[in-house]
Image (cartoon, grey):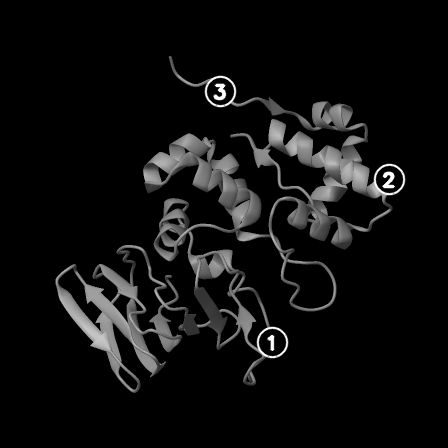
């Protein structure tokens, strides 16, 4: 027998179950506390998981007296994360996992359907949507590709910013979704190139091949990385080495150095 269809609640139903007004739910959505799905006609749909989250939000607000930013931090810690990474004053950005969850709801897909299409366990996708952690670099790319978007967009890299100069150490960071992979943004805003500084822990890898449109350039600053093209062309790159290749070629990589490896990685156009 097939699995039961997930239950969805309309705004009024979710508000009644939570003990607040529908306008309060809409306000919490604007504040980034909840991201309900959408029906094919654009109406909000709240899952049972959403309702449980709404009840936690209501408790933190009434019993603890927390403001929206503090509630977000409390929920992130409660869900098993270390709390969202604040990039400045004001509210924290929406997590990558919850963005993908919103895209899944908008597409009318179940976690089982998406996980099967991408080739991961449903439990892995469920954890990632909840905590924005626990998937490999290749899986993150495949999830973005499944929804017709890019990792850069999901990470907030292409949002409007006004810095023409980025000083050393002042880089915006991608959310740390992939174990051992830190991605630092070297050029802000919507540009013709994605310019990144990759910091790879020992053993960190893409966990398989991926490809997309465009061209890319890799330059090793320190350490060493193995980069494989089309499953048969192997390149061991050390400090000072560079590689330029078409992004449509299947590519995979791994830090084979026994220490940290640091790379400059440029994609053009920004299709990753």
Towards the viewer: 24 or 260: 260
Q: Nearer the viewer, residue 253 or 248?
A: 253
- In the figure, is residue 262 to the left or right of 158? left
For the residue pair 160 and 50, the one nearer the viewer reads as 50
Which residue in the structure is indicated by mark 3? Answer: 5
Task: Give the Cα separation between the discs numbered 3 and 2.
Answer: 34 Å
Label 1: how many residues lie within 10 Å, few (<14), some (14-19) or many (20+)?
few
Mark 2 or mark 1: name the one nearer the start of the chain. 2
Mark 1 and mark 3: Cα distance apart in space:
45 Å
Which disc is residue 63 wearing? 2
Q: Which quadrant does the N terminus fall into?
A: top left
The spot of residue 161 in percent (x, y) is: 59, 71
| Of labels 2 and 1, the one closer to you | 2
Q: Is residue 44 visible?
A: no
Q: Tell me where residue 202 appears, x and y as whole percent.
A: 37, 68
The label on residue 35 is: none
At x 81% / y 31%, what residue is drawn?
21
Q: Secondary structure at mark 1?
A: loop
Question: Is residue 186 positioned above or below 132 on the image?
Answer: below
| Label 3 environment density (alpha carbons within 10 Å; few <14, some 14–19, many ≥20) | few
Secondary element at tag 2: helix
Give the residue displayed 66% in from the left and 25% down from the top.
Answer: 10
Location of residue 254 in the rendering, given as x and y in whole percent from the top left corner = 30, 65
Give left or right: position of 267 versus 133.
Answer: left
Residue named by callout 1: 162
Q: Are marks 3 and 2 in contact (CB under 8 Å)?
A: no
- The residue lying at 39 percent from left, 37 percent from top is 121
Residue 153 vertical position relative to residue 143 in the rendered view, above or below: below
> Which badge, 1 or 3, is on the more N-terminal residue?
3
């Amino acid at each position: 027998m097939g699995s039961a269809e997930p239950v969805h609640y309309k705004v009024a139903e979710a508000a009644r179950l939570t003990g607040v007004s529908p306008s309060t739910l809409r306000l919490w959505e604007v504040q980034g506390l909840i991201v309900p799905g959408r029906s094919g006609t654009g109406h909000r749909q709240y899952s049972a998981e959403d309702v449980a989250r709404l009840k936690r939000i209501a408790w933190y607000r009434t019993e603890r007296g927390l403001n929206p930013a503090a509630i977000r931090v409390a929920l992130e810690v409660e869900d098993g994360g270390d709390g969202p990474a604040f990039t400045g004053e004001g509210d924290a950005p929406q997590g990558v996992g919850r963005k993908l969850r919103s895209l899944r709801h908008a597409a009318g897909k179940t976690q089982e359907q998406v996980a099967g299409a991408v080739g991961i366990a449903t439990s892995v996708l469920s954890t990632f949507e909840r905590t924005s952690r626990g998937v490999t670099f290749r899986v993150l790319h495949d999830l973005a590709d499944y929804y017709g978007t890019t990792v850069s967009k999901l990470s907030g890299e292409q949002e409007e910013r006004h810095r023409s100069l980025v000083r050393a150490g002042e880089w915006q960071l991608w959310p740390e979704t992939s174990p051992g992979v830190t991605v630092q943004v070297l050029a802000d805003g919507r540009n013709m190139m994605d310019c990144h500084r990759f910091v790879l822990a020992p053993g960190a890898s893409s966990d398989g091949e991926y490809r997309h449109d465009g061209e890319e350039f890799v330059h090793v600053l320190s350490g060493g990385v193995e980069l494989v093209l089309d499953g048969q062309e192997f390149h061991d790159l050390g400090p000072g080495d560079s590689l330029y290749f078409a992004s449509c070629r299947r590519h995979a990589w791994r830090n084979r150095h026994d220490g940290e490896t640091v790379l400059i990685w440029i994609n053009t156009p920004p299709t990753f």
